[in-house]
Image (cartoon, helix red, strand yellow):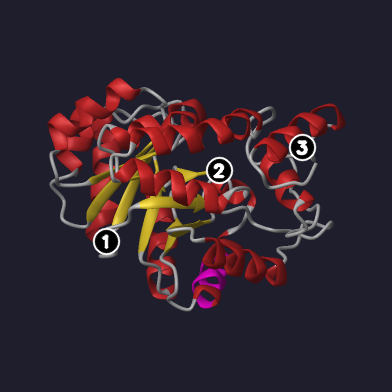
Amino acid sequence: MFHGSMVALVTPMREDGAVDEEALERLVEFHVEQGTDAIVSVGTTGESATLDEPEHCRVIRRTVEFARGRIPVIGGTGSNSTAEAIRLTRCAMEAGVDACLLVTPYYNKPTQEGMYLHFRTIAEAVPVPQILYNVPGRTAVDLLPETVGRLAEISNIVGLKEATGDLDRLEALRERCGEQIDLYSGDDATACEFMLRGGKGVISVTANVAPQAMHALCAAALRGDREAAEAIDARLAALHRDLFVESNPIPVKWAVQEMGLIGPGIRLPLTPLSEAFRPRVREAMREAGVLDD
């Protein structure tokens, strides 16, 4: 359903931590103009863990309103509580999203059967298209390919964001899922190769900073043009790396602020990017062509 460069959008905030809706509108316009293929609202990069439910729903709703149908919007609605995930997913559906992104239940470490039942229950409760999100480095659980294969049989589960960075996992997923769902990279550093091997796109942190280049990279990879895709990816390699010098979204929010698109707000327990890392991120932005020398 969704292909190409899908930005895991930062949630702009004022210095006091309040959501900055004027900046949010500015970001949506920026991504429409730059050719981003879809927006993921309030995912990990959007600080979903620190927004309460009313804020979470409002940011998704306002993103849909600002997009005005010009770009697909995917609402991040996962939770480690099945009931909360259902509420958030229903809220996003009512706001008019094109799909929802649901992370594996974090912290409480369910079994594979528990994760299967969690996602099946949400899919049965809310008929919006749903994309699963596997990121063991943050959640302490790993949604295994055999479990994804079972979930792929559910009609409104349409995709998986796989953020392990393990390219061998892609082959295992394709064997079990066939063409039933689309597979997306959740790891910018390996996304180019992931798409060249058959993935359908990337849900990207880098796209916040270099959206035009990420769109071009994805377009080249999806048409099988390895040379063009790898050339673009090489220019972005430092960004892929250095946007994670501290926990996401700390570096990317600072970078987007450097571009003049948002203010400095970020919510505790996250803190602004350390002074020591700022030259490194700035240099990566220069290499990507998004900051002047």
Q: Which mark is residue 282?
A: 3
Q: Which residues are magenta?
A: 58-65
Which amino acid type corresponds to the residue marked 1 in the rendered image?
Ala
Q: Are marks 2 and 3 in contact (CB under 8 Å)?
A: no
Mark toward the viewer: 1 or 2: 2
Q: Are marks 1 and 3 in contact (CB under 8 Å)?
A: no
Locate residue 70, reporting x and y percent.
44, 74
Q: Are marks 1 and 2 in contact (CB under 8 Å)?
A: no
Q: Is 144 drawn above or below residue 254 in the view shown? A: above
Q: Indicate which disc, 1 or 2, sits on the residue closer to the N terminus.
A: 1
Q: Residues within 10 Å of mark 3 (few under 14, many from 20)?
A: many
- Quadrant for the C terminus, please: top right
Q: Which mark is residue 205?
A: 2
Q: Indicate which disc, 2 or 3, sits on the residue closer to the N terminus.
A: 2
Disc 1: which residue: 125
Locate residue 16, reporting x and y percent.
83, 58
Q: Dot 3: what SS?
A: helix
- Residue occupying image coordinates x 28% and y 60%: 129
- Residue occupying image coordinates x 41% and y 27%: 164
- Quadrant for the N terminus, please: bottom left
Taken as a whole, is the magenta stretch helix, strand or loop? helix
- Residue occupying image coordinates x 69% and y 29%: 246
